[in-house]
Image (cartoon, rainbow, N blue to C red):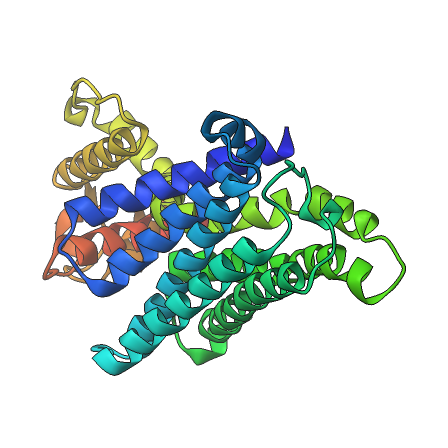
Amino acid sequence: MTIAAATVLLWTAAVYRVWVTLTCPRELWRTSFTVTTVALAAGVTLYLRRIDLDGVVHTPNLTGLVAHLVLAAGVASVHIYLLTLRFESPDPTRVRRCLTWGGATIVAMVMTWLASPVHTIEYVDLAAAPRSVALVLYNLVFYAYMAFALVNVTRFCVREANPRRGHAALTRRCSLTLIGVGCGTAVPVLALYALSAVLPDVTSLSGNRFGHLGDALLPWPLMVLSLGILALLTMPWCVELAATERRWRTLKPLWAHLVHRHPEVRLSLPAPRPLLVRRHFRERRVIIEINDALRQETVGCRVHSGPTALGGALATRQRGATQAHDVLTATVNETAALEQLLQTARAYRAAR
């Protein structure tokens, strides 16, 4: 059940990245990130279904090889992605070097797999296959290449997610943190699989325990990694929703006071259905109603004396000849106007 949930999250992240790539301008960083995400989802799925698929193609252990090759291609792509994050315009020589190393790894894996004794019987785990130098080299090449990439990604995420490096956006920092944790915790899992595959050849011990432990731990790094990718989609929505709710809680006491005194300013409009759009709609309506009420309310304050004075006057019901709206200062945009109303609402709540 856990590995199934991890696979669903992986494919959700992959579909999301494909959608972003198809709907946004073509960029090397965006394409390489998408290729990595799709390769990870496809490689894990192929590996989980390898026995069934081998039965379809009538070739023992072939799907396991294909799964590893797809993952290796994803690793080559993630190295290119890291280059695009380090350099605005990566040197083509560096990109070709990443592709060369990836291609050399894939060729080495294919050659050692062909030379391994795994072509007559289907093995649930290659650790149970007859021992051979070629099979040991196959496992070492694959796991070393994967671990090298995971360590690089982890180091990058730790460095970039550090708040002391600058005021990175919360969404990006959260995404980098989750991706870094997912990749970092996957390294010990790969080590367990490598021990499971290589240990019987170098010692008299069985590696089954390491393999079973790796199987039990694998879904968790995959899920964390998927959540890190999906955070780029979900976090902005959640952050904006939380900010809208926070502004509503600040404005609500002032708004309730003003519409109670001036019920004619209430607007009767149908609210849209999407949650975030509905919250933005409510905020916009509340701002309009507060401003309309302030044009009808009078207070004992000087003109342009500011939101703090207005909030206190409204809370203590200081009557006067100044129109409440004139107590506020002129603003240059809607953001500044909203912030001024929020300051008024905070002063109203503090003085009430």
Point out the residue furthest to the right here: 204
Please state the horizontal and vertical placement of residue 63, each as a whole percent of the image.
50, 40
Residue 210, placed above or below residue 306: above
Q: Could you say which is closer to the camera, residue 240 or residue 305? A: 240
Q: Name which residue lies at 52% across and 32% down.
A: 54
Quarter of the rendering containing residue 247? top left
For residue 283, above or below residue 170:
above
Left-right relation of 228 to 28 = right
Residue at left offset 46%, top offset 66% = 105
Q: Residue at x 78, y 62 (%)?
A: 201
The residue at 33%/78% (across/down) is: 97
User: Quadrant location of the N terminus?
Assistant: top right
Q: Quadrant of residue 18?
A: top left
Q: Position of residue 287 (x, y in %)?
A: 21, 39
Left or right: where 139 falls relative to 245? right
Q: Position of residue 348 (x, y in %)?
A: 37, 48
Question: Is 253 drawn above or below residue 161 in the view shown?
Answer: above
**Residue 151 percent coordinates (x, y):** 55, 70
Residue 343 visible, this orientation: yes
State left or right for residue 346 relative to residue 125. left
Q: Nearer the viewer, residue 128 or 218?
A: 128
Can residue 318 be seen here?
no
Image quarter in which the C terminus is found: top left
Nearest the viewer among 164 and 153 is: 153
316 lies above or below 97: above
